[in-house]
Structures are given as structure tokens and as C-alpha cells.
Image (cartoon, rainbow, N blue to C red):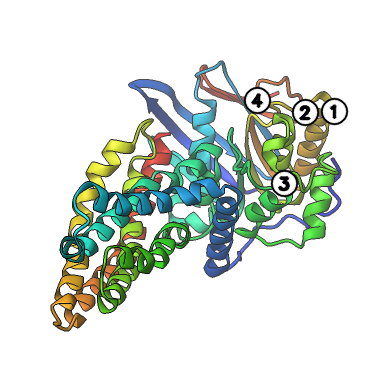
Amino acid sequence: MNADCRPALTLRQDTVGALAAMQTVFARDMKVAFRQRQDLLNPLLFFVMVVTLFPLGVSPEVSFLREAGAGILWVAALLSVLLSLDHLFRHDFDDGTLEQLVLQPQPLFLLVLAKTAAHWVLTGLPLVVLTPVLGVMVHLDGNSIGVLCLTLLIGTPVLSLIGSIGAALTLGLRSAGVLLSLLIIPLYIPVLIFGTGTVASAAEGAPAGAYLALMGAFLVLALTLAPFASAAALRISLFNG
Amino acid sequence: MSEPLLQAVDLQCERDERILFRDLSFSILPGTVARVEGPNGSGKTTLLRMLAGLNDAWSGNLLWCGKSRSAQREEFLRNTLYLGHRPGIKPLLTPMENLRALTAGRRPLPDPVLRQALDGTGLTGFQDVPCRNLSAGQQRRVALARLLIADEPLWLLDEVFTAIDASGVSAIEQLLQQRAAEGGAVVVTTHHDLRLPGMQRIVLGGGSTDEC
């Protein structure tokens, strides 16, 4: 091994900016995900399957589907995000990437935020994109589909952010699945209630602005608090690992 | 250069209600290679993770450049390179992509430099093959390529010789020695019979440190 490309040894006073470090984390997660497309498709397929099974299993009546459609889509989206959460930190934990992440001279919560953002772009965003198609399938009218997409667009990042806390907390456990769901579902319930509530009130012709503003508040709250909680939880999991 | 980079004072670590070591004190000066020794389960990896900041279940004091380490986390992290059992190599990415991702979060380097570092570890021709298709030793070498381009003064290397062939081992020994000569400090744990002139030993299980 030769070593002729090494600079002189001094204590370093500077490092790359936090934004550049976040970009690196985000880009790596995207690249890894696209090398393993199967994992990407799983939550999407789950989402589509659940929504298609409802008319078959319960009732194909237009009146029923129009009433329950938004709820079905929201529950399916919530569960499919939940399904993908365990992957958020698991692979990085197993191959040591997480150790290197914690040891980066950057605030850890920003790096966690970058990872969570990648998770949302890879799972939440595709769900939002698919929603109009499935919305038509359950006979939602155009206005409801628009509002539904909007609530999912605001709501799914909240799901990813809250989920990252649970994923980080259960990282040290061998089988985290059930515990992760138990921890996270109660925190998802308010998002679900307001998400479906928005669509219901919009379907009745009421303005959805107030509901959407509340969901926006959820997002801001999750965005500002969840990365700190996840970062702290990651440290605990790593230190005990 | 005589001020210790890292100083441990009366370290004590307990794991699973068993005391791994107590009253452990040592200084890592610039220009030294220190080898952590001890039988399996004596806490070598635990000690290294403590030094790296990946474990906080210990008592005692750790000083970085003479001041408490916890008060200067970022300064410490900027100047320390830790390579663990699991070195952070993604099996789905190529050695180039792995090395780029690992260095970009600390100090971005141009691609030719990274390529040269991979060449230097004997991975010529494998730069663009996904790491899962490489052997264990080759994957290890991807992580070791970081050492060729690292400018952190303190290296913490856990079982750095694992899965490396004989010529690779002597190359790493040379690298460590050269590193020390340049004023860097290295702490290694290994079961390999590492003997470098002036090597410092930190013996666990007995709980003392001495020079050999």
C-alpha cells in the first residue's frame, strides 16, 4: 500500500458544511435503494393490494366506497409506511454505516433528518403519487381526491418522522416488528384522524383550510422534534450494541 | 508535539455486572502506536468504542488535547478516525461509491485521489464492482483505503488485520509505523502478533500499561 497522497498532520479546525454532509447521506440512501428495487416496491404493492381488496372483501357498492374510500386509503398508506420503517436504520446498523454516521463531526439530528427525508421520498411520496389512481377506483370525486392527496402529502412526512423515532429505539432488538408497531401506532392515530377528517369535511363542501392548517402544524412539530428524539434514540441503541 | 492527544484517567467499565477494567490510565501521544492487548472478552473492543465515543457506560475521565472530551465533541470527531468490526461498507455500492460516501461527510476528495487509494490497497480493477461480489478481505481493504487518504491525527482501529493476507498485513504494519513517524497516533486492537519498535501496550485483564 503506498501513501503518497497524504497531507501533513495537523489538528483540523474545519470540516464540510452540515448541508453537504446531509446531501451525502441522502444521496447514498437513494443510491442503495435504487440498487434494491424490490424493497422499494414492497410498500407500494402493499398499499395497492389493501385498497383493491376492500371492495372485494366488504362491498363494491358505490355509496359505501365513496364514504369509506378516503379512510381506506389513509389506513393503507399508514400501514405501508409502518411496514417499511424497520429498514430505515436496520441495514446501516448491521454494516456499520450507522457508527460512522454517529462519528461524523456534524450534528447527528441533521443526518437523521436527511435519512428520514430519503425514506419519505422513497415510500411516502410514491404513495401520494399513486393515490389519484386508487381514489378513482374507490369512486371518490375529483375534489375529494385533490384534498386526499394534499393530506397525504402533508401527512406521510409526519409518519416517516414519527416512525424514525420508533425505528431508532427498537434498533438494538432482534425482532423489533411488533414492538415498533405498538410504539408508533398510538402516535399515528391523531394524524390519521385529522387526515381522514379533512377529506370528510371537504366532501361535505366545508372548507378544508382549518384541518389542513392543523396537519401542517403536525408536520412542523414532527420536523422540529422528531430528528432530535431519533438521534438520541440512535445513540442509545448504538451504545448498547 | 509532546502534549497527549488523548488521555485516559482512571477508566472503569462495567458490562453485564462484570468489571472489565478499572483504574485504567494511559496517554496517547502523537507519534505512537498503542496496541490494546488481552484475551477474548477482556474488553478490547469496548475500550476502543469508549475511546471513539460509541459507548458511554463508563466512569473516569477522557481528555482530548488536555481538556475534557465531552466538552469538545466536534473537535474530537473531526480529528479521529474509527474503523470497527463492521467498517460501514455498503454491499450494494461499489468500492468507489463507498469510499466517496465515507469521505464526503468529513472531507470530500476528488475521484482520482480515491481511485489511487483503492489502487494502493490492491483493489485495482475492482473499483466499480458492487462490494457484495468482493471477498471478505477485499471488503476490508475498501475500508482500509480510508487510511491511505485520512488526515485525522488519531486512528482507532479495531481488529484491523482481520481477513487480510500476509502481504497486506505487512503493508498495514508499515503504514502504521510511517503514520507514527509523521506524528499521527494509532490505537489498535489485534490478535495478530504486532511488533513495532517503540510500540505502547495497553494490557487489559491485568489492568496495567507499559512500554515494550
Single out the mark in the foreground, 3 or 4.
3
- Tell me the crowding category of disc 4: few under 14, some 14 to 19, or many 20 or more residues within 10 angstroms, Cα based: some
Q: Tell me what residue is drawn at x 28 percent, y 70 percent.
A: A148
For mark 3, what is the residue?
B95
Upstream in the sequence, badge 2 or badge 3? 3
For mark 2, what is the residue?
B196
Upstream in the sequence, badge 2 or badge 4? 4
What is the secondary structure assignment of the residue under circle 1? helix
Residues flagged by tags 4 and 1 on a common chain: yes
Q: Is residue A87 left or right of residue A78?
A: right
For mark 4, what is the residue?
B190
* Mark drawn on residue A27: none
Tell which subunit mark 2 falls on.
B
Residues flagged by tags 1 and 3 on a common chain: yes
Front one among A3 and B122: B122
Residue B25 visible, this orientation: no
Q: Position of residue A213 (x, y in %)?
A: 22, 78
